[in-house]
Amino acid sequence: MAFALETGRRWALAGLVTNLILAVVKISAGIVGHSYALIADGLESSLDMLGSALIWAGLKYASKNPDTSHPYGHGKAEPLAALFVALGLMGFAVLLAGASIQRILHPESVPEPFTLGVLVLVIAIKESLFRVVHRIGVRLDSNAIKADAWHHRSDAITSVATLIGVTIAVVGGKAWASADGWAALVACVFIGWNAGRIFFPALAEILDTAPEPAALDAIRATAASVPGVFRLDLCRMRKMGLDFYVDLHIIVDGRISVADGHRIAHEVKDAIRNAHKRVCDVMVHVEPGASADLQSAAQDT
């Protein structure tokens, strides 16, 4: 987990630095090139910078070792950071929509042609960042890292919309000066959609929503394969940061000794952790089975 969190923090920091540079470039080019849309795009990059900072802080806190106050570790900081990023994206989408409507109703001067080149460069950088960071987030199954990746994609979408609008305004002249406002309004829909893609998985993780049934079935199959386990009475799993915690109730022969029951429980725990590397801990509760139950279980197998 430490290596995974360090990887996430490193890319979040890279995103933070990139967003800072791009924000300065876009806002400066927008002011010099008389492009309101490019200035707004630069402000969106500033929000991306805040999002990357939140992701980096969340991953840093999540990497702390368990302590007395947090015996299960600090992994919840990771989806919490993703949640804040999603809320920031939603808020920005609303603000940008309002600014876009103002731009449509009250068109300003036509942007300078050189702003198009700035936007093309920005789109290429942000889309490349999205692909790299999202691939890492999927590999590590980190909602925070995937949230940071989608933040890059949202910025790229906004820049594409800005590029379309600025191109139409530059080519069409003052009669088409409101085109970038319409394009930015369309981008708001995509930004809000991406925010939802981040928000709901992060919220589900914070609320300890059960993972996909296939994941639970794999855990149950591993536990049931251990000699001495006749049946599973309960199997629960929850995600904590980049790791999983499992709670199991196993049925064993009620006639065996406490020591043998304890040994079987440890074998179940070891089997699950060896077969499923992202399982951090397994709590195994041993229950004695009645003779009739054990005979039935033996016949089923």
Image (spheres, rainbow, N blue to C red):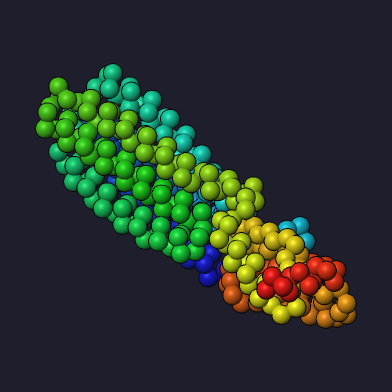
Q: Quadrant of the N terminus?
A: bottom right
Please state if 18 lies on the left or on the right of 4 as rendered: left
Question: What residue is rendered at 47% in x and 56% in y?
Answer: 145
Residue 279 in view here? no
Q: Quadrant of the C terminus?
A: bottom right
User: Farthest residue toward the top?
Assistant: 105
Vertical comparison of 156 with 258: above or below: above
Percent of width and height locating residue 246: 68, 63
**Residue at left 22%, top 28%?**
179
Instruction: Give x and y (percent) for residue 260.
Output: 83, 81
For the residue pair 114 and 180, the one nearer the viewer reads as 180
Question: Residue 161 lies in what quarter of the image?
Answer: top left
Quadrant of the rendered image containing residue 216: bottom right
Residue at position x 73%, y 74% in the image:
298
Q: Is residue 190 visible?
A: yes
At horizontal 41% and vertical 39% (from top left) the residue drawn is: 193
60 or 165, which lies in front?
A: 165
Measuring from the top left, give residue 10's x and y in whole percent.
46, 63
Q: Nearer the viewer, residue 211 or 60?
A: 211
Q: Is residue 116 above or below residue 126?
A: above
Q: Is residue 201 above or below residue 265?
A: above
Number of numbered labels in the structure image: 0
Q: Is residue 19 left or right of residue 69?
A: left
Estimate the x, y position of residue 106 in percent, counting from the top left. 27, 19
